[in-house]
């Protein structure tokens, strides 16, 4: 996946409502009508890209603390998240990735919900290797029918910064 996004632009860093204003002003108007691809980079910064972008491209091919899709409402210093998920088949973040997402939004001064508005559970089949989205607690591989593990190894290997200056 990383090789396929070499040369693709990284996501736009959002550290304030002013950054979000600038990103949305520069975005294709058609892209503003749907959620954006996002990642939280290892420094804890929210990065945005059009929805059709790969999360790995948005992250510049690197590790992330969180990834998914996000939508906003409002304008000029009064932005709020209306939708946010951990839907990223490139990184397969678990629902626990909410903490760095919330922290990045708080640091940027963007209003947010108390958690993901749509949380996704991913599992990789141990028999065929296929990535699966678990729905309705059905831990069965959609490709080969094998049982999926109920626990999963972490896919997001970056750790939140411990340096207080980055917070």
Image (cartoon, grey):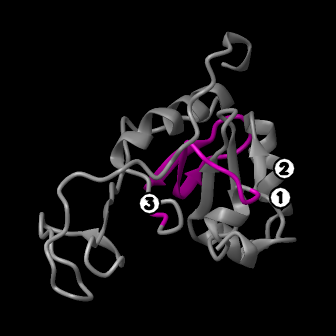
Q: For residue 11, which quarter of the picture?
A: bottom right
Q: For residue 44, which quarter of the picture?
A: top right
Magenta span of residues: 60-88
**Residue 120 x %, y %:** 33, 59
Of the 4 image quadrants, the one containing the N terminus is bottom right
Asked whether, in this view, residue 147 is left or right of residue 44, the answer is left
Residue displayed at 64% across by 26% down: 107
Secondary structure found at label 3: loop
Distance between mark 2 and mark 1 Cα atoms: 5 Å
Residue displayed at 60% across by 33% down: 104
Task: Specify which label sits upstream in the sequence, 2 or 3.
Answer: 2
Asked whether, in this view, residue 50 is left or right of residue 146, the answer is right
Of the 4 image quadrants, the one containing the C terminus is top right
Instruction: Pick the residue in front: 76 or 19.
Output: 19
The tag on residue 92 is 3
Q: Residue furthest bottom?
A: 143
Q: Which residue is mark 1?
A: 25
- Above or below, 21 against 103 in this view is below
Residue displayed at 20% across by 69% down: 135
Q: Which residue is mark 2?
A: 22
**Residue 105 x %, y %:** 58, 35
Instruction: Pick the residue in front: 81 or 98.
Output: 98
Q: Are marks 2 and 1 in contact (CB under 8 Å)?
A: yes
């Amino acid at each position: 996946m990383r090789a396929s996004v070499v040369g693709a632009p990284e996501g736009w860093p959002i550290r304030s409502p002013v950054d979000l204003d600038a990103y949305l002003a520069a975005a294709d108007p058609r892209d503003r009508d749907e959620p954006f691809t996002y990642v939280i980079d290892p420094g804890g910064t929210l990065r945005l890209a059009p929805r059709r972008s790969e999360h790995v491209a948005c992250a510049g091919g690197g590790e992330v603390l969180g990834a998914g899709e996000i939508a906003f409402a409002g304008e000029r210093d009064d932005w709020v998240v209306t939708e946010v998920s951990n839907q990223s088949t490139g990184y397969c973040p678990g629902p626990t990735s909410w903490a760095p997402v919330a922290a990045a939004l708080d640091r940027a001064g963007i209003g947010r919900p108390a958690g993901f508005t749509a949380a996704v559970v991913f599992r990789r089949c141990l028999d065929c290797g296929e990535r699966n989205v678990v729905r309705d607690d059905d831990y069965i591989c959609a490709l080969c029918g094998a049982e999926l593990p109920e626990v999963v190894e972490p896919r997001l290997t970056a750790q939140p910064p411990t340096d207080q200056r980055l917070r």
